[in-house]
Image: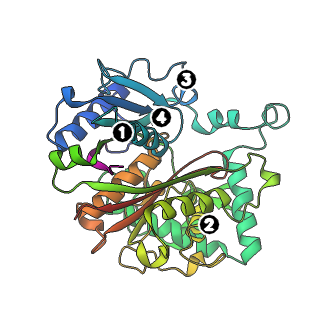
Amino acid sequence: MQKVGIVGYNQVKLYSDANYGRYEMIFEAVRGALDSAGLKKKDISTVISATNDYYDGRTISNALTVEPGGGYLADESKVEMDGAHAVLYGLMRILSGNHKLAVVWGGSMASCFPYHSARLYETDPTWERPVAYVNDISAAGFQMRAYMEKFGVIPEDIAKIAVKNRKNATKNPLALAEAQNPNLTVKEVLESEIYADPIKELMVAQPCDGVAALLLAPEKQALKIIDNPVWITGVGYNQETYYLGDRDLFKSKSMELAGKMAFSAAGIKDPKNEIDVAELFEGYAHEELIFTEALGFVEKGQGASLNSEINGDLPINPSGGALGGNPPCATGLIRIIEAVKQLKGEANDYQVSGAKKAVVSGQIGMCAQNNIVYVLEGGN
């Protein structure tokens, strides 16, 4: 079976309230991805978009995105999940042998819809939704509290993750301006507004406007397009039950199983020592610690002990991660793009030295109910 390579990418800068329309953003992202690979519209054989009817506030959210997204006169489909899940769909289309170039784009304009209110539709319609006590924010509060109490983790440990990622975002010109803070302190994080105790405002990945796109091609085609594709060598995915009371929220079973699946496919036996950089979709700062443990980088409860700075033992989210900007339906896709930058030596001020292998994740659902993990290699 041929490998599948990432041969182009582009991301629009993230805004809390973009001053131009979604279709322009989609066109910019897709056109930029094609330009990065020296390709034209006629080279596209399939387009996969990641948008969501609830987030767009309309049925068939991809109805008017076909043309600006490159889908006119090409095979076109949509994934109503995270952009990282759309990449899996594109990957399968390439592996089917029916397509030579897949465009995968994802994004939304969170400034145009009440993101957290829309996510109420993820809750149980009989008991939870009418009273609205359980939502993605309060559920994350349960998750953080469960993690802290299980392992004796203190709020300062989690605040340090928020500080690290927001400082990293300062080095990333595409990150959300409001998320960038080179002088942020742990004290300031802990004194920010309460979202759902014990979660504070600066621990939350802020929804924002943004679109990103990347290009996938089979091995022979990829090597004709560019000299140094980044290869997808492993992918894993898993979903656990929705009901929060049936889950151990202090850990992420879906991330653990998705990671094992991806590592097995890529032949990774010792993730801690074989992976050079990780871009993990952390909707809240504490999730980065839970995911770090679920992927086997450290023992359970020891996530805060890992030096995950850009020049640390295992850099995690050198781009700033989702705390640097969280455009719904694009965040996981951006994690993949950021890992590609690292492997190609194109991350500039936040480049991890000598990065050869990366792990990336995307998520959807309450408390990261569903996780998808990729192993990427090559580039440099």
Which of label 2 and label 1 is nearer to you?
1
Q: Residues within 10 Å of mark 3 (few under 14, many from 20)?
A: few
Q: Is residue 268 left or right of residue 364?
A: left
Q: What colour scheme governs how the chains and residues are painted in the rendered image of this protein? A: rainbow
Q: Which mark is residue 149?
A: none
Q: In what element is the residue under mark 2?
A: helix
Q: Which residue is mark 3?
A: 57
- Name the residue located 46 percent from the left edge and 29 percent from the top edge: 78
Which of label 4 and label 2 is nearer to you?
2
- Name the residue located 53 percent from the left edge and 38 percent from the top edge: 81
Q: Mark 1 touching mark 3, by CB under 8 A?
A: no
Alpha-carbon span between mark 4 and mark 2? 29 Å
Q: Which residue is mark 4?
A: 111
Q: Which mark is residue 290?
A: 2
Q: Residues within 10 Å of mark 4 (few under 14, many from 20)?
A: some
Q: In the rendered image of this protein, does residue 107 appear above or below residue 145? A: above
Alpha-carbon span between mark 3 and mark 4? 12 Å
Q: Amino acid at mark 3?
A: Gly
Measuring from the top left, give residue 75's x and y in whole percent: 36, 23
